[in-house]
Image (cartoon, grey):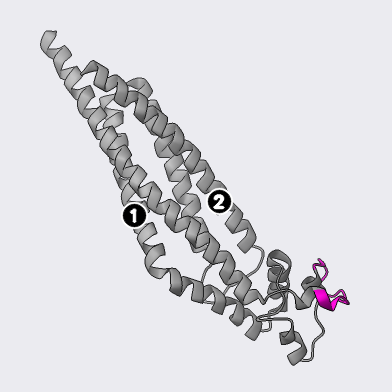
Amino acid sequence: MGCLSGIVNFILYIVNIVFLIVGILLIVLGSIMLSDLSRFDVAGSGTDPNTIPICVTVLGGLIFVVSFFGCYGIFRQSVCMTGAYTSMVFVLFILQLVLTCWVFVNRSAFLGDMSNLVNLLWDSHDYTAMGVLEETFGCCGDTSYTNYNNIGLSVPGTCCGYLDRQATCNTPSVYQSRPGCSAKFEEFWNDNMDIIRWSGLGLCIFDLVVFLIAGALTNCMRSQNAGRQVYA
C-alpha cells in the first residue's frame, strides 16, 4: 500500500504541475483574445464577444488555483486537504464540461452572431470601430472595400495599414486584396473556437483522470492513517 501511495503521489504531483502550466496558458490565451477585442466598443449590439475570452481566463485562473492547492496538499500529506482537492477537481470538471458542451452546441450560431456584429457596426455608421477592426485584423469595409465606394466615401487609411484613418489610401492593390471585416472577424473566432472546444474536451478527460487518481490517493492516505491508529 505504501508503494502504491508513493506512486500515486508522484503521478498526481506531476499532473498538477502540468495543470499549473495549462492554467497559465489559458490565462494568456484569454488575455490575448480580450486585448484584441477590447479595442472597439460593441455596446448595445446585444452580443458580447468578450464572453468566451472572459470564461477562458477565469477557467485558467481556477485551474491554476486548484493545481496549486493540490500540490500543497500532497506536500503536506493531508487527508483533509487532498479530499478537498478531489472535490474541487470534480467541480472544475463539471464547469469545463458545461463550457465545452456550450461551445460545441452553439459554435455555428456564435460565429453567425460575430459576423452580424460587424454588419451592425457598419449599418450604424460606427466608422471608428470599423477602423479599429481594419487595423487589428487587416481587413477593409464590411464585406469589401467597395462598401465605401457604394456610399460615396473614399477608402480610409486603415485599409492600407495606416494608423490614421483619415490618411489617404493611394495604393489600390493593398486594400483591394484585403477581405471584408465581417468574414475576417468570423475567421478569427472560427480559429479560436476550434482551439477552445478541442482543448476543452482534452481538459475534461484530463480532469476526470485526475479526479480518479486523487480519489485513489485520498483512500490510500485514509487507509494508512487507519493502520497507524490500529497499531498505536
Magenta residues? 161-173
Task: Say if residue 44 shows up in the picture.
Answer: no
Residue underneath mark 1: 97
Residue type indicated by callout 1: Leu
| Lower sequence index among marks 1 and 2 | 2
Q: Quadrant of the C terminus?
A: top left
Residue 130 inside the magenta-drawn segment:
no
Which residue extends farthest top? 232
Q: Is residue 133 above or below residue 54?
A: below
Q: Which mark is residue 29?
A: 2
What is the chief secondary structure element of the magenta stretch? loop
Q: Is residue 187 above or below residue 82?
A: below
Mark 1, secondary structure of its residue: helix
Residue 51 position, x and y percent, is 49, 63
Residue at 32% from the left image edge and 38% from the top image edge: 210
Q: Is residue 38 above or below residue 120?
A: above
